[in-house]
Image (tube, rainbow, N blue to C red):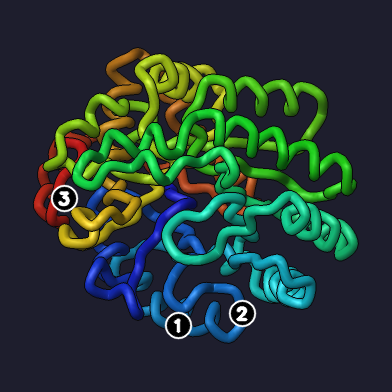
Amino acid sequence: MVDLHVHLRDWAQSSKETVEHGLHVASMCGIRMVADMPNTSPALTSRDVVLRRLALASGPSRKYGVRYCIHMGLTADEAQLAHAVETYRELFPLVIGLKMFAGHSTGDMGIVTLEDQSRVFQTLSRLSYDGVLSIHCEKESLMHPELLVPGRFETQSVARPAQAEIESIRDMISLARANGFPGHIHICHISTAQGIAIVKKARGEGMWISCAATAHHALLTCDDARDGSRCLRMNPPLRSPADRDAVFAALASGDIDYVESDHAPHTLEDKIAGAGGIPGFEGTLHLLAALRNAGVGQDRLMELFCTRACEIFHVEADDFLPDDVEQRIRMVKGQYQFDPFR
């Protein structure tokens, strides 16, 4: 399996997880390639920091047999954007693409105004960047942080409503078209039925666009977050049963391209304080089992967990799907301080 959306922490966040631990757990799950997201501390927005991160991961990558690569982060600064494109072209496939946070999440990498988002697309188009631009789609102006209630994880779904994702996806498609963006847009961790429909329509109109989904958005709902001991707070948050069912159905049908974990561990203390993100590797196994139980065929499962992501990012495909899913789930239980998928 491959997982091209993980947050392995380390460095200033080593209390949450180290790269070595994350790669070890990934290997236990049967994951043979991961792509780390750039909102590390320090952030992966310069060539020097990217090289430091690759060096950090090289030993554990060999030790556990898990290939490691990076999505380089973007800012609204044109010089940094040019630097990121240059670094991508130099280091691909160790750097497999670029990442923009269209809404704030963990860290401080949000590019949240339409003006700044447009500048990103203008600059990447001017530089003829034709790789993948992965986007965290949540529209900042539609979020309501004042509605968060400490200790009530389900209020995350009210504070960051479905419409914030839907309108951000619309914005990204519009900006890409307006600026003649020559690359591939990838919508990360899609979580709404309407968002899926918008991506499907754009794809049908010839746009080079894809989307992926997580186990938690395919299996859980905002009602599950009422159990505070599971610490089910993440960005984007859990949605309604109807959205959850739409995500699961779109994974089975092909309207969602592939599965990504959005693995993002925190300490229990950080979760209680309101940090967004959950350990996700175990969830990927639960989703594989659920899709099998729903009658999804082996060819489609291979696309979801192995080949489709590799096709989109133009990296070597992995054709391994574990059969011993329940055994692997038992192996990884207890690796983190809380279990969202219990």
How busy is the neighbourhood of tag 1: few (under 14 within 10 Å), some, or many (20 plus)? few
* Mark toward the viewer: 3 or 2: 2
Instruction: Give me the C-alpha separation between circle 1 and circle 3.
Output: 26 Å
How busy is the neighbourhood of tag 3: few (under 14 within 10 Å), some, or many (20 plus)? some
Which of the marked residues, 1 or 3, is nearer the chain's N terminus? 1
Q: Nearer the viewer, residue 92 or 19?
A: 19
| Amino acid type, residue under disc 3 in the picture | Val
Kindly state the secondary structure of the residue where label 2 is placed. Answer: loop
Circle 1 residue: 55
**Which numbered circle lies on residue 46?**
2
Farthest-out residue, front: 146
Kindly state the secondary structure of the residue where label 1 is placed. Answer: helix
The answer to whether residue 181 shows anywhere in this view is: yes
Instruction: Give me the C-alpha separation between circle 2 and circle 1.
Output: 14 Å
The answer to whether residue 27 shows anywhere in this view is: no
| Amino acid type, residue under disc 1 in the picture | Ala
How busy is the neighbourhood of tag 2: few (under 14 within 10 Å), some, or many (20 plus)? some
Which of the marked residues, 2 or 1, is nearer the chain's N terminus? 2
Is residue 62 positioned above or below 130 on the image? below
Residue 174, quarter of the rendered image? top right
Circle 3 residue: 332
Whole-percent x, y for residue 150 in the image: 23, 47
Taking the spot 87% from the left edge, 60% from the top edge, the residue there is: 128
Instruction: Give me the C-alpha separation between circle 3 and circle 2.
Output: 34 Å
**Which numbered circle lies on residue 251?**
none
* Mark toward the viewer: 2 or 1: 2
